[in-house]
Image (cartoon, grey):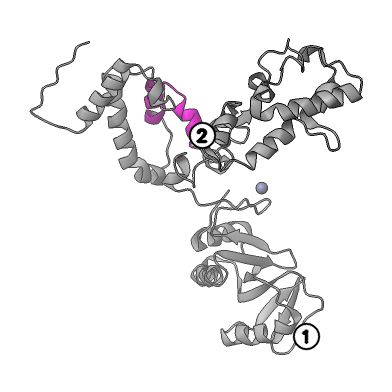
């Protein structure tokens, strides 16, 4: 995806369409037919006198508009020939186009379809737009960065068949469906047993020997008969009760989020790559590899200028961690999984980073 600036659009146009006539326009959604006259007037008042509709140049004062209107029309800001002399005029026209339509410009060359440029991150192929990345886009602790599906936890709690039916050798009658053996829920078990009897199914057959259709009956019910799914749906509606929430949580276990594959980040955040790597990949490398990658990152001159301070800060933080012997750790490693010694050495690395003087540390390792 590319985010454009008037000067980058001008450069692109001059490179691709040198010496051609161009219309610099901005897109505007078509008004309701009743509001058409009002739109014409307000455009004229702002100094725009032409629009392009269906590849046809239309004068706001004299020409009639086609009917029905397409969903979007292009308002002409300027007409010019694309060459070096017109560059500053072109940039100016693009600036006002971006201003009029919140960062969008349409360029029409000859009789072609408008070329769309956007000041927001957008795919030049299909027009899909992306939010502008910000530092918090890369934090799963922030709503702008967290995967919307798992809220940044990396996994989702689902009802787990292994917890619901801990012993599949048991039959329905023996209480294979564990939550239905609780005194307050035996009604569900009884109803299911009645259905089994009516259908001449064997209530004493072990759960793992039931046919798929029989298991389906237990999970999904049938007609007015309610199954395990309905049982949980009913309980979900009583979640406001503390004991129900506690009860439900006993039958759920975490499974990796399929939207973010456990990376905890929004898919758009993982689309942002540096040298073909996204942040979760980089976070999975041992710190020694990470440092080497940072040192050998091929950067263009202006990228180098932007990244200089950041790289310097990263480098010094990493070298403290390496100095205390944590080269094998990864940035994705969760703090709670660190050993006592590792956690202590991370604290030590932080202290070293503070450039504190006159303090003596006593370590018992
Ligand atoms: Zn695309
Ligand atoms: Zn997720």
In the image, 128 versus 146, the foreground residue is 146
Evaluate whether residue 292 shows in this view. Answer: no
Regarding mark 1 in the picture, which secondary structure is present there? loop
Residue 22 occupies which quadrant of the picture? bottom right
* Left or right of 330, for residue 158: right
Res. 286 image quadrant: top left
How much space separates mark 2 and mark 1, taking CA atoms? 58 Å
Residue 234 in sight: yes
The residue indicated by pointer 1 is 64
Q: Quadrant of residue 237?
A: top right
Above or below, 270 relative to 171:
below
**Mark 2 C-beta to ligand 2 under 8 Å:** yes
Q: Which mark is residue 153?
A: 2
Is-magenta flag for residue 292? yes
What residue is drawn where x is 60% and y is 60%?
A: 117
**Residue 47 image point, x, y percent:** 57, 84
Point out the tag, 2 or 1, that comes first from the N-terminus. 1
Q: Is residue 61 left or right of residue 254?
A: right
For the stretch drawn in magenta, the main secondary structure is: helix
Of 361 and 323, the residue lying toward us: 361
Taking the spot 73% from the left edge, 89% from the top edge, the residue there is: 62
Q: Which residues are magenta?
A: 274-295
| In front of the other: 105 or 299 | 105
Pointer 2 with pointer 1, Cβ within 8 A = no
* Left or right of 162 in this view: 329: left
Judge whether residue 17 is colored magenta.
no
Q: Position of residue 191 (x, y in %)?
A: 79, 29
């Amino acid at each position: 995806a590319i985010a454009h600036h008037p000067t980058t659009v001008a450069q692109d146009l001059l490179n691709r369409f040198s010496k051609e006539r161009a219309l610099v326009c901005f897109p505007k959604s078509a008004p309701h037919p009743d509001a058409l006259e009002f739109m014409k007037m307000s455009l004229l008042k702002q100094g725009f006198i032409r629009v392009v509709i269906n590849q046809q140049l239309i004068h706001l004062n004299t020409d009639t508009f086609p009917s029905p209107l397409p969903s979007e029309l292009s308002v002409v800001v300027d007409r010019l020939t694309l060459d070096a002399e017109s560059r500053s005029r072109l940039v100016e026209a693009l600036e006002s186009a971006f201003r009029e339509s919140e960062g969008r410009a349409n360029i029409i060359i000859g009789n072609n379809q408008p070329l769309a440029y956007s000041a927001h991150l957008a795919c030049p192929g299909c027009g899909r737009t992306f939010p502008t990345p910000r530092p918090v886009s890369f934090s799963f602790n922030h709503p702008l960065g967290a995967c919307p599906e798992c809220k940044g936890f990396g996994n989702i709690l689902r009802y787990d068949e292994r917890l619901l039916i801990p012993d599949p050798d048991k039959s329905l009658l023996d209480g294979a469906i564990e939550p239905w053996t609780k005194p307050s829920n035996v009604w569900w078990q009884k109803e299911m047993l009645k259905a089994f009897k009516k259908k001449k199914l064997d209530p004493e057959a072990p759960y793992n020997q039931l046919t798929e259709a029989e298991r389906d009956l237990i999970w999904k019910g049938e007609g007015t008969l309610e199954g395990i799914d309905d049982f949980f749906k009913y309980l979900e509606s009583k979640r406001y009760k503390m004991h129900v929430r506690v009860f439900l949580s006993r039958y759920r276990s975490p499974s990796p989020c399929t939207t973010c594959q456990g990376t905890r980040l929004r898919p758009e955040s993982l689309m942002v790559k540096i040298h073909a790597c996204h942040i979760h990949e980089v976070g999975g490398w041992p710190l020694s590899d990470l440092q080497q990658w940072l040192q050998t990152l091929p950067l263009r001159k202006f990228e180098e200028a932007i990244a200089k301070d950041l790289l310097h800060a990263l480098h010094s933080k990493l070298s403290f961690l390496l100095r205390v012997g944590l080269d094998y750790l990864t940035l994705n490693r969760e703090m709670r999984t660190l050993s006592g010694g590792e956690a202590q050495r991370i604290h030590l690395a932080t202290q070293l980073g503070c450039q504190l003087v006159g303090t003596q540390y006593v370590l018992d390792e």
